[in-house]
Image (spheres, helix red, strand yellow):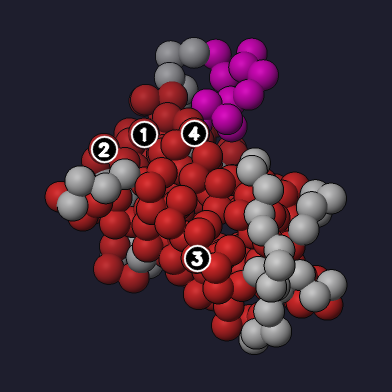
Amino acid sequence: MQDWTDQTDTRGVILTKARQLFLTLGYHKTTMRNIAETAGISTGPLYFHFRDKAEVFYHICNEAFERLEADFSRVSQAEKTAGERLRDIFLAYKAFYYREPQLFAMMHMATDPLSGIGLPAPLAESLLKKGLSLVKNMEMLIRDGIARQELRPVDPAKLAVYLFSVAEGIFVSNRMGILRQQDIGVDEMIGAAIELIEVGMIGAGQALEKP
């Protein structure tokens, strides 16, 4: 066992090792003892940092949402047209999907009602708000684009949900093997979604510049 008092990031080690366990064993078969052993510590320091397994799982998922939210915010605040920023949000989500496959998987374990994880209500509601904040970010971007007459006048809330659902559908379809069965890649699908943004939403006479 490692001496947890000498570790500079015991909490980070716990979360990293627990993430691997949740993805390999599943939520229900992972125990606090598993997590402690894999992290190289005793259960004492584990319970010092986290009350229970649900809290460990929550903090991993919360980190995932916060990283993606930071990416969305950075893109949406760039000095570009609304259409270009919407395109870049899709590209940022794709980059996150490739860069953080484990965190992406954990996010979807947490929010999938069929997973049967059943986090305590306060934790589940907190993660739901994180997901909604991603959609809200897109909605505010769309509102700004309409106000600048860079986007067609549509319902910003509905369009944001639609675009977010498109991105989610692409990545989930890829994880399920649907894209592979059709011999289609994630990059191709993201490219098609971006083309639809340009054709269906960008104002007449405007075009997206290359990223």
User: From the viewer's perspective, is 82 left or right of 132?
Assistant: right
User: From the viewer's perspective, is 37 left or right of 138?
Assistant: left
Is 39 located above or below residue 128 in the figure? above
Label 3 or label 2, whichever comes before in sequence order: 2
- Give the position of the C terminus as an image quadrant: top right
Q: How crowded is mark 4: few (under 14 residues within 10 Å), some or many (20 or more)?
A: few
Disc number lying in front (2 or 4): 4
Q: Distance between the residues labelled 3 and 2?
A: 37 Å
Q: Are marks 3 and 2 in contact (CB under 8 Å)?
A: no
Q: Distance between the residues labelled 3 and 1?
A: 37 Å
Q: How far apart are marks 1 and 2 (CA)?
A: 6 Å
Location of mark 3 (residue): 196
Numbered-mark total: 4
Viewer-nearest residue: 133 or 53:
133
Q: Which residue is drawn at 50% across and 75% down?
A: 162
Label 3 or label 4, whichever comes before in sequence order: 4
Q: Which residue is drawn at 43% across and 24% down?
A: 39
Disc number lying in front (3 or 2): 3
Label 4 or label 1, whichever comes before in sequence order: 1
Label 2 or label 4, whichever comes before in sequence order: 2
The quarter of the picture where residue 115 lies is: bottom left
Q: Where is residue 167 in the image (x, y as percent from the top left)?
A: 46, 60
Name the amino acid, label 1.
Answer: Gln
Name the amino acid, label 3.
Answer: Leu
Q: How far apart are marks 4 and 1 (CA)?
A: 16 Å
Q: Distance between the residues labelled 3 and 4?
A: 25 Å
Magenta residues, start to end: 3-14
Q: Residue at x 26, y 37 (%)?
A: 24
- Give the position of the N terminus as an image quadrant: top left
Name the amino acid, label 2.
Answer: Thr
Q: Position of residue 92 (x, y in %)?
A: 59, 45
Location of mark 4 (residue): 99
